[in-house]
Image: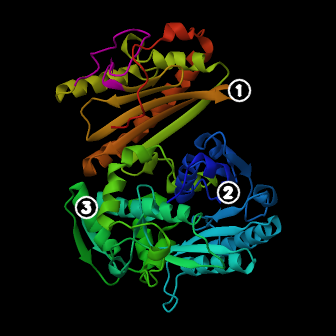
């Protein structure tokens, strides 16, 4: 285990993490920050990362594909985590992976890096490999040819809320009561929980290794995508029937995934190609070298679902796509786990206190800043079906505290001049939240408004997508009017915006 005593913290080496905007890299950053390591993160768009890391963590701009910024980022680094891959790229990802690895290996050698830790894919070299798995192997070989010692971890499917494979399983099982399963769904794999994977990555800093060891890592169970689909359905209390068919090719499967969720239209076939061959640990040496006892697939699935609310605010695999500028379609918002998210922001030329003032006064006699007649109509409909409607108003025209009712909403989080979180109490086929945040910006302040919906089965999805055009109009108009009000109305002093209750921790349920 790691020794986090003050004496040991003083001697901890400088570490570079690439891919820190991605699913694994983002969680690794937070884990190492908590253990006191001196960290540098390399990002093509540092602005996507700076607000999500500790103030002590350096964030430097760079791109392994172009080579830009690598020399500066690697200066003084002893251990570099290489967590870059281009599977989400619309271009030839194998070429980009190759160029990025060559540039990074050359820069690491010149900078005197003592070790590279690389996360690759679990493969059976005797089997035909997909382009994705061939690229993963090639990257490891390129890094080793640099002369810098490389520790390579090879993993199969990663189970964790937000990982690509897990989210694909979720999308299929949540959307479809009858699952038409092609042959690749029954191919054997050895999935690993995200917590166990992170422990292996951190453990690479402790082991005293020479040369270029390769460790195959996996959980304690052998299963398949079909087995994981059944386990996910069991833990979610969903009845699902799997009907195997032999004719669904990877191409047709990827098109099918694109219909289930647009997020998989680009990466679906690349992922499915990698599933067609078994990914089983053949060399168990990692169990002897690392102080890690891998858990079961069932326990990893359980942790992923139990920690959903906490992980909702953490990194997600699609963060990497967003950071690269390749955003998913906007209709209906973005799917994050079980939730659908519509987030909008607007900069205003005033202080954060002035920007937050109209947000704090929302609801009651002031209304909701847009389409108040529609809000009232929604309230009448809610009353007819036994809901609370819009008749409750608010306790005070300005003051607000956790637990207060705001019409058909309940305050579940409040931070003065910064954040207001509301949970819907109207009758809905699911759960809904509305979140307002204010933060400093170059022009003054930035207001972010986020609507979140967790649908309950097919009725919930039909509700969200059916009225989304109306929601989009209301959300857009609401944010626009709040921004205008913030710049038009004089801001109140913080003392007049006092809360009646201390801010609560972030809660989404």
Residue 70 covered by magenta stretch: no
Q: What element carries label 2?
A: strand
**Nearer the observer, 459 or 469:** 459
Q: In this view, does 455 lie to the left or right of 11?
A: left
Q: Residue at x 50, y 19 (%)?
A: 416
Disc 2 target residue:
15
The single residue placed furthest to the bottom in the displayed view is 126
74 relative to 333, above or below: below
Q: Is mark 1 on a helix, strand or loop?
A: loop
Q: In this view, does 185 lie to the left or right of 108?
A: left
Disc 3 target residue:
233
Binning the other alpha carbons within 10 Å of mark 2 as few (below 14), some (14 to 19) or many (20 upward) gives many
230 relative to 262, above or below: below
Q: Which residue is drawn at 41% across and 68% down?
A: 192
Q: In which quarter of the image is residue 300?
A: bottom left
Image location (x, y in percent) of residue 61: 74, 51
Q: Residue at x 41, y 27 (%)?
A: 504
Using the numbered discs, state the Cα–Cα distance from disc 2 to disc 3 in whole angstroms.
Answer: 40 Å
Q: How is the image coloured?
A: rainbow
Counting residues from the start of the chain, the first of labels 1 and 2 encountered is 2
Query: Is residue 183 visible in this depiction of the protein?
Result: yes
Residue range corresponding to the magenta coloring? 388-411
User: Answer yes or no: do the residues labelled 1 and 3 have beta carbons within 8 Å?
Assistant: no
User: Answer yes or no: do the residues labelled 1 and 2 have beta carbons within 8 Å?
Assistant: no
Counting residues from the start of the chain, the first of labels 2 and 3 encountered is 2
**Magenta residues: mostly which secondary structure?**
loop
Counting residues from the start of the chain, the first of labels 1 and 3 encountered is 3
358 relative to 133, above or below: above
**Nearer the observer, 20 or 202:** 202
């Amino acid at each position: 285990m790691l020794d986090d005593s003050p004496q040991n913290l003083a001697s901890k080496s400088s570490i570079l993490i690439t891919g820190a905007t991605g699913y694994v890299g983002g969680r690794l950053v937070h884990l190492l920050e908590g253990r006191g390591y001196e960290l540098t993160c390399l990002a093509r768009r540092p602005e996507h990362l700076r607000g999500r890391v500790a103030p002590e963590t350096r964030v430097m701009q760079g791109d392994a594909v172009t080579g830009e910024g690598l020399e500066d980022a690697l200066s003084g680094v002893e251990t570099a985590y290489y967590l870059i891959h281009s599977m989400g790229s619309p271009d030839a990802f194998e070429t980009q992976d190759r160029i990025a690895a060559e540039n990074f290996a050359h820069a690491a050698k010149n900078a005197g890096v003592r070790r590279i830790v690389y996360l690759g894919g679990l493969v059976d070299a005797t089997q035909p490999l997909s382009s994705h798995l061939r690229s993963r192997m090639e990257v490891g070989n390129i890094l080793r040819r640099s002369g810098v010692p490389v520790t390579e971890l090879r993993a199969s499917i990663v189970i964790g809320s937000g990982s690509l494979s897990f989210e694909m399983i979720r999308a299929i099982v949540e959307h479809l009561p009858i699952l038409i399963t092609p042959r690749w769904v029954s191919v054997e794999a050895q999935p690993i929980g995200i917590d166990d994977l992170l422990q292996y990555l951190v453990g690479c800093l402790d082991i005293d290794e020479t040369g270029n060891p390769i460790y195959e890592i996996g959980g304690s169970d052998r299963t398949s995508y079909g087995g994981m689909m059944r386990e996910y359905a069991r833990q979610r209390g969903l009845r699902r029937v799997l009907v195997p068919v032999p004719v669904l090719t990877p191409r047709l499967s990827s098109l099918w995934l694109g219909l289930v969720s647009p997020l998989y239209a680009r990466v679906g076939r690349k992922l499915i190609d990698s599933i067609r061959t078994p990914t089983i640990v053949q060399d168990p040496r990692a169990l002897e070298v690392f102080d890690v006892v891998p858990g079961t697939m069932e326990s990893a699935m359980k942790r992923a679902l139990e920690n959903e609310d906490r992980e909702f605010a953490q990194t997600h695999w699609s963060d990497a796509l967003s950071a690269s500028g390749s955003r998913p379609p906007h209709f209906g918002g973005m799917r994050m786990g079980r939730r659908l998210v519509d987030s909008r922001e607007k900069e205003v030329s005033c202080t954060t206190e002035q920007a937050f003032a109209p947000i704090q006064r929302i609801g009651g006699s002031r209304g909701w800043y847009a389409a108040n007649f529609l809000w009232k109509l929604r309230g009448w409909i809610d009353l007819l079906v036994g809901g609370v409607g819009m008749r409750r108003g608010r306790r005070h025209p300005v003051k607000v505290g956790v637990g207060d009712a705001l019409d058909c909403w309940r305050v579940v989080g409040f931070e003065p001049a910064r954040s207001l979180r509301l949970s819907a109490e109207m009758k809905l086929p699911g759960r809904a939240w509305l979140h307002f945040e204010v933060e400093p910006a170059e022009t003054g302040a930035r207001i972010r408004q986020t609507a979140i919906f967790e649908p309950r089965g097919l009725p919930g999805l039909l509700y969200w997508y059916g009225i989304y055009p109306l929601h989009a109009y209301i959300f857009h108009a609401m944010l626009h009017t709040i921004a205008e009000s913030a710049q038009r109305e004089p801001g109140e002093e913080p003392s007049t915006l006092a809360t009646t209750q201390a801010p609560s921790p972030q809660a989404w349920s």
